[in-house]
Image: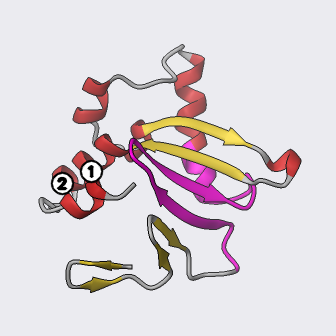
Amino acid sequence: MYGGNYFLAGARGNIFLNQDRESKFKYIEVNKSEIRLEFQDTDSSIYQYYIERWTERSEYGTVKPSMDSISESSDIRDLVIDVRNNTFCGAGATVLLCKQGFISFLKRNLNMPHLEEVSQLS
């Protein structure tokens, strides 16, 4: 995929493949309103990193984050809007992040103010 002057190895349209074929983390897919992180199964340490916060929030009845909490958060796990475990049918595991919140997070915390290209992907 070409983005401005950049070529991203492993990218296919709005999907960014993990080049490490041994990793349980398979790819990132950028959609209109969400960013999808796909895993081979739930054993991935990255998946576990996200699910820990999701489980913590569900215990307090605040699974879906508000836009206010997303825009102020300094923890990327607060951007999780859904977690899916479809390993029972061979589809793997998914973490969905709020796209708007993710872009704001990158701009604010990683000093990446020019992310218009990512916000245009779908």
Depicted 77 relative to depicted 18: above or below: above
Q: Is residue 4 magenta?
A: no
Q: Residue 41: x and y, percent?
A: 75, 56
Distance from disc 2 to disc 1, alpha carbons, whole Å, reads 6 Å
Neighbour tally class for label 1: few under 14, some 14-19, many 20 plus, Cα within 10 Å: some
Residue nearer the viewer, 30 or 92: 30
Check if mark 2's residue and mark 1's residue have beta carbons within 8 Å: yes
Three-letter amino acid code at disc 1? Ile
Q: Residue at x 56, y 66 (%)?
A: 27
Depicted 95 relative to depicted 72: above or below: below
Instruction: Please tell me the numbered disc located at residue 16.
Output: none
Q: How is the image coloured?
A: secondary structure
Instruction: Please tell me the numbered disc located at residue 107.
Output: 2
Q: Residue 42: x and y, percent?
A: 73, 52
Pointer 1 residue: 103
From the image, which quarter does the C terminus lie in? bottom left
Three-letter amino acid code at disc 2? Lys
Per the rendered image, the range of residues in magenta is 22-50
* Local secondary structure at mark 2: helix
Q: Residue at x 41, y 25 (%)?
A: 65
